[in-house]
Amino acid sequence: MEENEEQSHGQQADLSLKKGNYEEEEEEEEEGSFRLHVVTWNVATADPPDDVTSLLHLNSPKSPDLYVIGLQEVYSGPLRFVSDTVFDDRWSRLFMSTLASRKYIKVSSIRLQGLLLLFFSKLEHVPFIRDIQATYTRTGIFGYWGNKGGVSIRLSFYGHTLCFLNCHLAAHMKYASERVDEFEYIMDTQTFECKKAPTIVDHRLVFWFGDLNFRIEDHGMHFVRSCINDQKYNLLWSKDQLTIMKKKEQILQEFDEGPLDFQPTYKFDLNSDTYDSSGKKRKPAWTDRILWRLRPKASFPDEQDSYTSIMEYSISDHKPVVGIFTLELRKMYTTPLVRLQPEGDWSADIDSMVLYSPLQPFPSSTWDWIGLYEVGFTSVSDYITYTWVKDDEVAFNEEVIQVYVGKEEIPVRGAECVLCYYSNTLQCIIGISEPFKVGNKHIPIHLFALNGI
């Protein structure tokens, strides 16, 4: 629904990466502050760890509003990859199960061989995340195999266009220019069906991250390791290939990055914090990076709250990198497109009704549906049951529409649930009810007797 993206009255709505100053606008819009947690990790085909508490900062007093998780080298052997295309892969399942209990849902994801990108949101923001699209670009082995490339998810968040790009670029020290060429190719070829932001660079805010594979030039192994041991990382920055290439390439100059105040994240011996001790003795490097591009540039420096590696994970030869951002923006809309609620008591004993009211015009479709979800659901597809809106419409007036749900579709065992309206045209949830109780099905006493209960 492109008219919802950066509507004419909101073209100059402020969006920044730092708590900052705002100019008053003629039309008052609600200000918002949102915490974004970005992860990039080359997992080197390993299975996920048992615990991702540190990776997701689950013990932090400030919980993110959004999680964006980009992985590279997720195992994609033939048998595993076939199963992962039908079912969620092990990494996705871990993040989904971990975050669902904290009332986050997976809003979107995309997989290209070993590249995986996941976007999670707190449930309260989901009706304001619209126009979601995902795409990919292959660059590895003449573009035919997805071992290298980029995957992206774009969306409108409270009316602001955001794009998240997870890349795995060419390896080895000598291919710095090829890495830039691959990045430019990905940026040029990825397009979206969106008039306001048909390409990545058209978005108000772009996050670019992944195993970008840039290395540290010139310095010898002894000097690099001495700087790391003494935590004098700044002595290595001038020879970082990405820093060097930014001085030459206009497209890179548009992206900002926080200081590399953490030790290089590649290459480690497995199950240790020791840099490569093999015969190859690869030189440590900041291959794993998180950058951003804000359009137009803010009048003050862009900042992020945190940019660091998580050293405790050792299942891969890379350490994960986490960037935490505060997004200050004016909400260009604060009312969901649809309001919906259950009518009366719900249980498997009786047929039930859903009441919903369109609060704003939106492109409705005969393929729109309303899903019943248990509180703590993981994604849009994790519904208990659903009903097609048009097929099961039983009454209509200008304000309230009733939709029928048969009792045989309602779970016998009760639960705390919510109702979600899914727009097929917008490819997203556009309304969520307040939680409500679905009662247990009543079982007659004589059935208890027959079963010896």
Image (tube, helix red, strand yellow):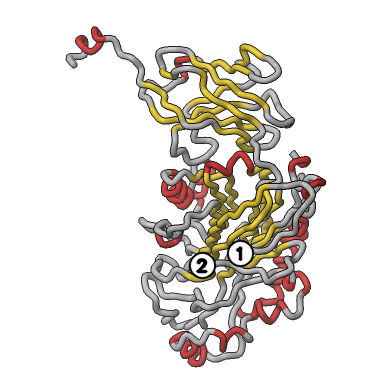
> Which residue, given by chain and number where applicable, does mark 2 sit on?
321
Q: Position of residue 109 (x, y in %)?
A: 58, 48
Question: Looking at the image, can residue 48 be seen?
Answer: no
Looking at the rendered structure, the kind of residue marked 1 is: Phe
| Nearer-the-camera pick, 83 or 376 | 376
- Residue 430 found in image quarter: top right
On screen, residue 148 above or below 446: below
Q: Position of residue 263 (x, y in %)?
A: 49, 78
Q: Position of residue 335 (x, y in %)?
A: 65, 37
Q: Is residue 300 left or right of residue 59?
A: right
Q: Give the quadrant of the C terminus.
A: top left
Looking at the rendered structure, the kind of residue marked 2 is: Val
> Which residue is at 73% across, 47% downward?
28
Query: Among all residues in the image, which is located at the extreme left?
Result: 452
> Which residue is at 53% across, 59% downward?
37
Cα distance, mark 2 to mark 1?
A: 10 Å
Label 1: how many residues lie within 10 Å, few (<14), some (14-19) or many (20+)?
many
Q: Secondary structure at mark 1?
A: strand
| Nearer-the-camera pick, 198 or 28 | 28
Labels 2 and 1 touching (C-beta < 8 A): yes
Q: Give the quadrant of the N terminus.
A: top right
